[in-house]
Image (cartoon, coloured by chain):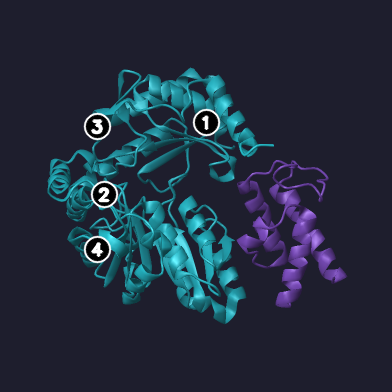
Amino acid sequence: MNTSTRNRVDDAIGKALSIALPELEQPNRDAALTSDMGLDSVQIMNLVMEIEDELDISIPVDLLSETRTLNELAARLVALIDEDGA
Amino acid sequence: MSLFDKFAKLAEARAALGAEGPSAIATPIESVESASRGRIAGREVILAGTNNYLGLTFDPDVIAAGREALERLGSGTTGSRMANGSYAGHRALEAELAAAFGWPSAIVFSTGYQANLGTLSGLAGDGDYLLVDADSHASIYDGCRLSRAQTVVFRHNDPDNLDRRLSRLGDRASNALVVVEGLYSMLGDQPPLEEFVEVKKRHGAWLVVDEAHSFGVFGERGLGLGEAAGLLDDIDFVVGTFSKSLAGIGGFCVSRHPELELLRLASRPYIFTASPSPAVIASTRVALDKVLQGQALRERLHRNIRRLYEGAEAMGYRLGSEQPGPVAALILPDRATALAHWQGLLEAGVYANLMIPPATPAGLNLLRISMSAAHSDEDVDRILAALQDMAAAMPSQAPSSAVSA
């Protein structure tokens, strides 16, 4: 795994969380977004759009449906960025 | 564990609504007596929570055409168009829809939901891209899921955000289908269509406009926002429904590309379902003619819309859209206030819609009032008076205090 990309993704997720979901303090990045954190689809969509802006990438909807936690999302985004050479 | 465990949160939400008052979800309309009048719990109410924008559901000609077809052709087609359900009326309605737009092809679907499902999943396949507005209707999202295309969401009504996504696709944008709506029913707002058209043209992408709520309402002939904006030459596909201005059940896709006809061989929601009944087709054909000739109805509708918007704004209500349209969404500060408004209006004899999270954008609590050409001046007066009473009865939660929410 590309460490610098992972750091960039983690930073972007942190910034996106603070903008889209400021009420979530220190969220557990291994918690399930829906069942554990209680996020609804609109909140997840807003979070993803903030991440897209931070990283200047487009995140396919399918990738979200296959992702349970923020750490899983980060790993998928690293793969997406490395694949696209972004 | 059981199959139903996953519904626990839905059950909680429904129970909470029931504890605070009558359930807006479960309130039955006992009878519908005209395009603007119904009966709920034994009382006559003004119907201001339907999408009967031109009020054609009780038009005598529309009803007569449906009745005649029911008696002459029977109650149902008993099959799909592909197998055994393609009647002359289906093709005639498709020809009339295509002619209305001046385009070569139209396809009728059995519901508006299936129109989006069948169009998007049929047009976009493996290796293609669907770019959809974040506030899109569920049928658009479901159409994306049924397709094998890669789906990306762009920010609501944000052409710059779409531009960045298309830029990332580069040459692949020629395989991208952009999907927007002519009017978004939750907040009643409209897209900046001219800017979206400019972006899609610059990237060589394709554009679908879902005119479900705007067909019949905007444009000289009622063809929707695309016609009103003078952009029909730049739109590739228009999707619509029969269940709003056309006063029936069904849907359509019409296109300036004759290749749309091939969709009949590729669209599962078109192929694997029963075709619309003869009565629905016959009544829709008459309703379509009345929509196209319906300038007076549209003038009446827009007069009602203006009065409602201006009245609600003067009371301090915050509306979901600055552009007046057939759906007036009042943004209220919390669920309790929204529920109280919905209940207060019902007690005053006005049936509106309560919309609460998670069904709403940005977690908003909404009271949604749908206007119709069938509403009289007195109806609009009564709706405004009911709103005024709600604002006056809850000074601690006056709408004006909610405008910063």
Cα separation between marks 1 and 3: 26 Å
In front: B285, or B345?
B285
How far across and down, in percent of the image, does residue B26 sit?
45, 28
Label 1 resides on the chain identified as B
> Which of the labelled discs sits on residue B400, or is there none?
1
The residue tagged with tag 3: helix, strand or loop?
A: helix
- Location of mark 3 (residue): B377
Which residue is found at the position 45% from the left and 39% from the top?
Answer: B329
Q: Crowding at label 3, few (<14), some or many (≥20) Cα neighbours within 10 Å?
A: few
Which of discs 2 and 4 lies nearer the camera? The answer is 4
Give the answer, above or below, for where B112 lies relative to B353: below
Amino acid at the residue labelled 4:
Glu
Amino acid at the residue labelled 1:
Ser
Cα separation between marks 4 and 3: 36 Å
The residue tagged with tag 1: helix, strand or loop?
A: helix
- Location of mark 2 (residue): B246
Which callout, 1 or 3, points at the residue further toward the start of the chain? 3
Which callout, 4 or 1, points at the residue further toward the start of the chain? 4
Cβ–Cβ below 8 Å for labels 4 and 3? Answer: no
